[in-house]
Image: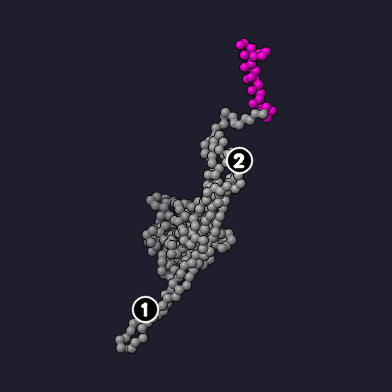
Amino acid sequence: MDKIGILTQEQYKNKFRVDNAVAFANPTNYGLEKVITTLTQIVAGVLRQKFYTVQGSLTDYVPIQMGTGAYSKQLFQYAVAQVGDSFESGIVQPGNGINKDANVDITIDGISIRNNFWRMKYEATKEIIEMGRVNAETFSYIEEQERARLKTFQLGIQKVAFLGTSDGLNYGLLNQPDVTVNTSLLPASVAAMTIEQLSNFAKTAISTYFANTNSTVFPNTWLMPTAEYMSLGVPVNPEFPIGTVREYLEKAFVYAGAPADFKILHTVYNNTAGTGQKGRHVLYNRDADTLTMYLPKPYTPYPLFPTGALDMISDAEAQFTGVWAKRPNELLYMDVQA
């Protein structure tokens, strides 16, 4: 068949090409949708927002205990102190009679901390789920929602661990009200000290801390501002670049009496946590008997639950405390003055 209507086959093909070109040049006029050009490459995956997170694990900074005291309004712990006669009052003279022995006793008290109840949900409509599924590069809307909620919880717990909550009902590692604030040890930044000054600082700081604990314990952790930590990675002696200033300080503290596992940590929260929003350094004993943060109920997401015929809701819950400084005299804040 040579003709299609009044046109030959070749004439029809040419007209079809022309009509298509016009239509795709003006898609709205012809009811067509031009989704993407052939010069565009769809990149696989989803680009997610980045947030500040501390190096390593949060438990490297604060001991965290999970699963204790779920659904309790307060977490309570007994505290026992020894009272009574001194050791030497127990020295007796034979033959002086009975009922003259020294006595020992204990006093029982308790400390407690608030337990916080936390919930968060997200909604998933049928239309949004389907839109994510039929895209040229598919992604799971529900998975991205869950990632966002989990990250919100993790960042929230991280902030509470260092600064507490903004309502003032929970304290973090850097703002405990009963911890001594020393403003004389750091008249200037650590980064500005000479090697001799650093050595003297290590001896003075650890003796100040030891006295603060009534001579009972040495610190095993020095938490400093990230801004200063980064400046300590330079060689102690540029002519003999064998060790860094940071390594030198860690050894200086150990030589001054700190335990062998003494280490220096850092966070950006320390940058402005001190007096006048200057840097705050913390010497402390990183031990569960000294300070602990509790997660009575860890982050727990629940399955999607239908609401109506088309939509779904996902709930999650958790419970957390602030940082519980059980022995506040085993922490010492050193605020930079200059």
Taking the spot 45% from the left edge, 70% from the top edge, the residue there is: 79
Residue most extreme to the right: 29
In the rendered structure, the answer to whether residue 39 lies left or right of residue 224 reads right
Taking the spot 59% from the left edge, 38% from the top edge, the residue there is: 131
Give the magenta part as a residue range. 1-30
- Foreground: disc 2 or disc 1: 2
Q: Are marks 2 and 1 in contact (CB under 8 Å)?
A: no
Q: Is residue 119 magenta?
A: no
Q: Quadrant of residue 220?
A: bottom left
On screen, residue 296 above or below 51: below
Please provide percent x and percent y for residue 111. Answer: 49, 68
Taking the spot 57% from the left edge, 41% from the top edge, the residue there is: 129
On screen, residue 22 above or below 159: above
The answer to whether residue 274 is visible is: no
Circle 2 SS class: helix
In the rendered image, which residue does mark 2 sit on?
A: 127
Q: Quadrant of residue 12?
A: top right
Q: Amino acid at mark 2?
A: Glu
Please provide percent x and percent y for residue 38. Answer: 57, 28
Q: Amino acid at mark 1?
A: Phe
Quarter of the picture containing the C terminus is bottom right
In the rendered structure, the answer to whether residue 153 lies left or right of residue 233 reads right
Q: Is residue 7 magenta?
A: yes
Circle 1 SS class: loop
Please provide percent x and percent y for residue 59. Answer: 45, 56
In the rendered structure, the answer to whether residue 247 lies left or right of residue 111 reads left
In the rendered image, which residue does mark 1 sit on?
A: 87
Towards the viewer: 190 or 143: 143
On screen, residue 296 above or below 98: above
